[in-house]
Image (cartoon, rainbow, N blue to C red):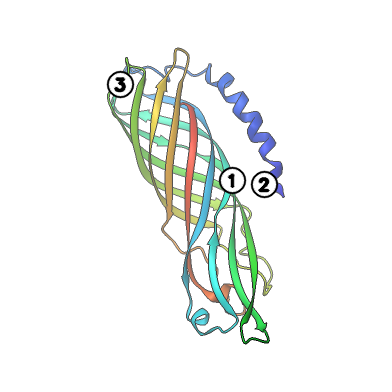
Amino acid sequence: MFIIHCYKRVIFAVFLLPVLSSAQINMHDDDPDYKLNFGFTVGVNSSHFRINHSQAFVESDSILVVESGKGQGFNVGIISEFAFNNHWSLRFIPALSFAEKDLDYTICTGIDANGVCKKELVKKPIESIYTTFPLLMKFSSEKFNNKANKVYVVGGFRYTYDWASNSEARQDDNVVKITKNDFTIDYGAGLDIYLPMAKIAFEIKASYGLVDILVREPNLIYSNMLDRLNSRSLLFSMHIGG
């Protein structure tokens, strides 16, 4: 799969980022004269869907369960951060994100001799290649541990465009179509570590989709079982600079 092949590029980026970060200017300085900082980020994500079932699912005798399986992916991006003071800053982190997740359907394929339903699990994999545009406010603590570290919280909104969306694909009973556009609310926390030549941060952030990303087409069997889909993800990141 395309997503798997891209891991080699991410591994290369992990080794390249520390080299590039040495060119960052004032990214570990609290001098208020330097308000704009830049950096790089790389991370892994875990994502799934929040599902609302449709009336067709309630009335269905063949499809017994619809669940969202969790999938893994990764992110790479560029950080632009404007510091208002030593505590508050505004972050813009455009990134390229790869993710894959499943919709799992448990289907009754017939009745055996004992009158028990014979079940089959059908997976509908959904691969996504996102361009993400999050705008986040960051609040940092005072430095501690001999002025080497800061803890912080972040929160804001994100627009996402899915280049791999199948929303314009031809009708196919086996397809679940997902829109190209999504809006999410993001929040999380992290730890800034100040080194002599760079600043490194480790961050965990949750993302909750605000809009329904299901493309409704009643003629598609698997889509017809769903009334609403919302994206959910958890992102673990390492920032260098910013």
Please report contact status of discs 1 and 2: CB closer than 8 Å, yes or no: yes
Badge 1 marks a residue whose secondary structure is: strand
Percent position of residue 197, x then y: 47, 14
Image quarter in which the C terminus is found: top left
Badge 2 marks a residue whose secondary structure is: helix
State how far apart marks 2 and 3 are (Cα).
Answer: 39 Å
In the picture as drawn, the residue positioned furthest to the top comes out as: 196
Three-letter amino acid code at the position of disc 3: Lys
State how far apart marks 3 and 1 are (Cα).
Answer: 33 Å
Q: Which residue is mark 3?
A: 143
Residue 3's disc is 2
**Residue found 43% across the figure and 39% down from its top:** 204
Q: Is residue 225 visible?
A: yes
Q: Is residue 153 toward the left or the right of residue 58 in the image?
A: left
Q: Which residue is mark 1?
A: 73
Q: Nearer the viewer, residue 136 or 189?
A: 189
**Residue found 56% across the figure and 21% down from its top:** 18
How crowded is the residue under tag 3: few (<14 C-alpha within 10 Å), some, or many (20+)? Answer: some
Three-letter amino acid code at the position of disc 2: Ile
Percent position of residue 59, x then y: 51, 85
Figure check: 3 above or below 62 = above
Residue 238's disc is none
Q: Is residue 223 toward the left or the right of residue 187 in the image?
A: right
Q: Nearer the viewer, residue 116 or 79?
A: 116
